Image (tube, rainbow, N blue to C red):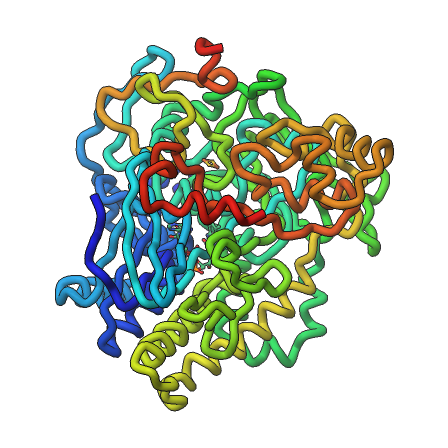
Amino acid sequence: MNSAEHQDLAVIGAGPAGVAAALAAADAGARVTILDSAPQAGGQFYRRPAAGLGARRPQALHHAWGTWQSLNARLRAHVEAGRVRHVTDRHVWFVERLETRFTVHALIGPEQTEPDTVTADAVVLATGGYEKVLPFPGWTLPGVVTAGGAQAMLKGGLVLPGRTAVVAGTGPLLMPVAAGLAAAGATIAAYIESADPKSLARHASTLVRNPAKLAEGAQYGAALARRRIPVRTRHTVVRAHGTGRLEAVTVAALDADGRIRPGTARRIPCDTLAVGHGMLPHTDLAQALDCTLDGVNVAVDDEQRTDVPGVWAAGEATGIGGAVLSRAEGEIAGLSVAARLLGAAPDPRVLSAAESVRTRLRAFFAAIDTVYAPPAHWAESVTDDTVVCRCEEVTAGEIREAVDGLGAGDLRTVKLLTRAGMGWCQGRVCAPGVAGVAGCPADTARRPFARPVPLDVLAQPGNPSRNEASHD
Amino acid sequence: MSDRRTPLDLVRAEPGPAYTATFDGREIQVLPGQTVAAALWSAGVTSWRTTRRTGEPRGVFCGIGVCFDCLVTVNGRPNQRACLVPAEPGDAITTQEGTGHDELR
Ligand SMILES: Cc1cc2nc3c(=O)[nH]c(=O)nc-3n(C[C@H](O)[C@H](O)[C@H](O)COP(=O)(O)OP(=O)(O)OC[C@H]3O[C@@H](n4cnc5c(N)ncnc54)[C@H](O)[C@@H]3O)c2cc1C
Ligand code: FES
């Protein structure tokens, strides 16, 4: 089933960034297709319970639900008017650039064996991000889940993995996760943050320019206090315990250098550990298009254009910064696409509101980023028998042997010697862990395709497998 | 205190009628719209795969289709991501041992 219709713009991702980009471009008259792997629009932040679950008050799991309702209403109006096509359950695995046009190659979900393509003059990559988790002994036990994953399963499926949870790691995402799990009936035995949020005070001038963000944090703080959730800052999870299933975690205090303070270890019984150490952007599609990266993020200019003509990027693919920043970037991208398709520069007056939101929030998240870094010496508590690459079951001991015994000095060599990062997830999960344990820089691995692609799809005439073989 | 409330209470869910699927032959109740992973969590199951090398149990990790830890066999098809695949009435969900293709070796 091919969607033969040619479009002005293809937007990949229907989260806050992609929806905002599609709305801005469609408002300006462009014909837009949004492709998204999920069955409903909303992305990670506005993930909703499946329709069959009949949620009467989905807002109980959400912050700023009204904002989503108005975005969604505008999206539906455009879809009904035929200006926007929203194709759900499409897993985009490759975007192919042909002269001045693009072919977006997708697999139809959830089975992901049937192909679908869309052609367009321009593309907005709004693929968001995923959670980073650094390894520790026991992190592969069932019951240990990413903090965002616990939230996603709760928001989408209305389920909890257990009854007593510890929420741990670092970063502001832990707050809505703890508040959400608690509101849904889980007992939060402890909230463990490795950073010291008090050091945010050093960024006071940035903070006061973001009162809404401060209020959001205060709201979550109050929710945690109301439920008497014990919060420990400058603490970390040292180990998860259990046989076949999580039974407890050991947490300990950190000293000023980010090392575990001897004698502070404490065991907390729990059946769920929701853990996260920040987020990483999804950059596969951008890299396969040859877009330049800025560190781990897709590099963009003031109009959210990448350095590949016709390709824009917005939201967390260009840097982690939450839903409001993602929306502002999406809007700028959509306005820019609409103007550029007509051969004009976007009107600075229509850009300015979204631009000032973007400037303010980028500064805010830069401050957040410096405060919520994982403990400096986290890799020291990763024991040799700890699995670091979950797919290929490569242990820290094997990685250390590759470095110390066999002289591997970069991630690529470690990967070739140990198979770390060569499994199903293609290193998306283990890359920061392997780099940390190996003591080498975390490069951004190039993956030819953003999704595993069945061979019979690749073998079909007109598919980009042959061109791709020339990439490294 | 309303402490033992459930996620369904929280959002005042009025789901359509539950249907039956099986996990390793045992009947489980599934609510419409839930993924295989959500259905298994509701049934109190948190692991449904063993790893290829060491036979360790695994279940959901990332919850959004990135990590491939939640692989499971559904109606005889191995390597389905339980966190993405919707559960259907009558599904036979089975624990996936290793690659799920061991009988082909
Ligand atoms: C699991 C998880 C849970 C989160 N929960 C919260 C929360 O509760 N509160 C909070 O403040 N922040 C949360 N966040 C942070 C969240 O990422 C941002 O706040 C916000 O959603 C980013 O918006 P975005 O539009 O850039 O990306 P996203 O919202 O991530 O949207 C990206 C969309 O693109 C789709 N996509 C990605 N790759 C492809 C592809 N190759 N083909 C097709 N579609 C694709 C995804 O399915 C998704 O729908 C969460 C993040 C994660 C990873
Ligand atoms: S839990 Fe990560 S892919 Fe399903």
Q: Residue at x 42, y 47 (%)?
A: A183
Q: Position of residue A165 (x, y in %)?
A: 54, 37
- In the depicted view, which residue is nearer to us: A209 or A428? A428
- In the depicted view, which residue is nearer to us: A456 or A279? A456
Q: Residue at x 60, y 32 (%)?
A: A390
Q: Quadrant of the N terminus of chain B?
A: top left
Q: Position of residue A294 (x, y in %)?
A: 61, 65
Residue A182 visible here: no
Task: Find the residue positioned furthest to the left.
Answer: A81
Tell me the quarter of the picture where residue A32 sits: bottom left
Against B92, residue A123 (above or below) is below
Q: Residue at x 83, y 54 (%)?
A: A257
Tell me the quarter of the picture where residue A72 sits: bottom left
Against A69, residue B67 (above or below) is above
- In the depicted view, which residue is nearer to us: B21 or A117? A117
- In the depicted view, which residue is nearer to us: A381 or A109? A109
In the displayed structure image, the side of residue A108 where residue A217 appears, left or right: right
Q: Position of residue A275 (x, y in %)?
A: 59, 43
The number of numbered badges drawn on the structure is 0
Q: Residue at x 31, y 74 (%)?
A: A24
Residue B55 visible here: yes
In the displayed structure image, the side of residue A405 where residue A420 appears, left or right: left
In the displayed structure image, the side of residue A166 where residue A70 appears, left or right: left
Q: Position of residue A243 (x, y in %)?
A: 61, 19
